[in-house]
Structure formats: structure tokens, C-alpha cells
Amino acid sequence: MRRGTALRRCSALLAPALLLLTLACQPRPAQPVYGPWEEGLTLLFEDPSLPQPERMSDRLQVRVAQSSMAPGAPRLVRLDLANVRGQASLSVRHQDGGIALLGEDGHVVAQTLPPGFPATAAWRDRGIQFSVVGRAAWEGSAILPATSEAVGVWVEAQPAHGPRRRTLYLPNLGEVESLEERNGAWVCVNRLVGRGFLDLPAAPLPNQRP
């Protein structure tokens, strides 16, 4: 066997192993995090209530651009959002099971999930009443790897005006499906349809071991 051929074969074998090792070495949160936080993780969403081709063209991509989920608080995550209409970035803070959306000045502008979630059964934010409906397995979990948790928590949002909305949150992914009440029926208006890594996640901090 020629040396060049052997080197190419070794490289082909080492690449998947390196990816798996890098994933394993990422710092893990001490408790379940109901939102995306692994650097490089990319999620794709669509609105099943839309007709084609609008459903496909309006897909939203959410990518974890930066994450500081090492032990200690606060734990910050920057998300890059993109669709055919443009791009935007969001900063969120994970703390005690809660998720807060931060403004450009670093102050909280919305509390997506409250501290203590999912043990916290009810809360209110921006005039909307939220309540935990219960736990359930996600019917769309076939797109997830076998190691992903497929059981999440349904949360209902009741605004002062407008339809009720129910959202299913899965650990390490956050929202995977949302339903809106329309004419007495629950209609799916957002669903996770793709999950993957567009690049290698960031290496662990020097003082952390796999």
C-alpha cells in the first residue's frame, strides 16, 4: 500500500472520531437546559399551517453562534437567526432553569422560561399568563439522534387578547413545536424539521476535561 493512500484512509477514519470526541468534551450543564446551547448546533423550523411553497421559503434557521455554558452564572448564549427576509442575533441567559432574552444593553427584555422551570408551574410576563400543561413525548422525535431526550414539557401561553398558544420544550433544544388555538382547534404553527452541526463545536476550556 502506498504511503499517500494509507494517510488518506487514516484521515477518513480519524475525522468522525475527532468530531465525536469534541462533542463529548463540551462542557455539560449541571441541570437540564430547555434551549439550544451547544456551539454550532443548527436548528431548522417551519410553519406547517402555511401552504407550499411559502412553507419552504419561510423556513427559519437558528444557529448557536456562541455559548458560555461552563459551570457558573450567568450562562450566556448567542443565537443567529436567518431566513429569506434577513438575519438577526439574539442573546439569552440561562439561570436556574430559566431563560431570559437580553436586549442590546444586557438587560432582560423578556423571560421566556422562569427560574425553577419546569417545577415552576405558572408565571406571568409582558401581560401574558403562562402555565405548565404537563410532560409528553414529542411525536417528531424521529429527526433527533438516538441520544437526544424526546420527552419535554408543554407550556401554555394565554395573552390578554388573542389566541392561546402551546409550546413543547425539549432539553438541549428548547421549542420544538408550537400550537395555536384557531376556531376551537389546535393548529401547529411552528415545528422543528431539521437538526445538525454546520461546523465543529468549540473546544472545551483549558481547565475542563472530557
Image (cartoon, grey):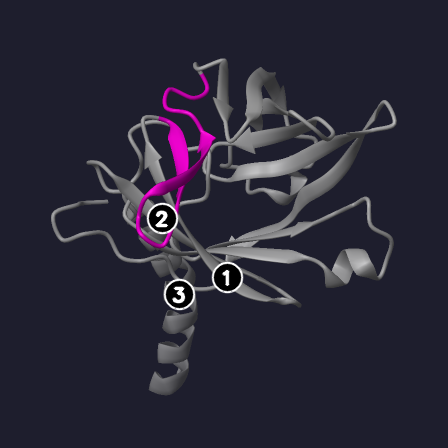
Q: Say above or below: 188 vs 206.
A: above
Q: Quadrant of the C terminus?
A: top left
Q: Position of residue 40 (x, y in %)?
A: 42, 57
Identify which residue is drawn at 57% across, 37% down.
175
Q: Position of residue 134 (x, y in %)?
A: 59, 15
Q: Which of marks 2 and 1 is in front?
A: 1
Residue indicated by mark 2: 77
Number of other residues with Cα within 10 Å of mark 3, as a class: few under 14, some 14 to 19, many 20 or more: few
Q: In which quarter of the image is the N terminus?
A: bottom left
* Callout count: 3
- Regarding residue 44, the answer to whether it shows in the image is yes
For the residue pair 143 and 83, the one nearer the viewer reads as: 83
- Element class at badge 1: strand
- For the magenta stretch, what is the residue range? 97-118
Identify the residue at the far left of this view: 207
- Regarding residue 153, the answer to whether it shows in the image is no
Identify which residue is drawn at 44% across, 33% down.
111
Residue indicated by mark 3: 15
Q: Nearer the viewer, mark 3 or mark 1?
A: 1
For the residue pair 120 and 4, the one nearer the viewer reads as: 120
Is 27 on the left-hand or right-hand side of 181? left
Instruction: Identify the amino acid type marked 2.
Output: Val
Q: Which of marks 3 and 2 is in front?
A: 2
Residue indicated by mark 1: 88
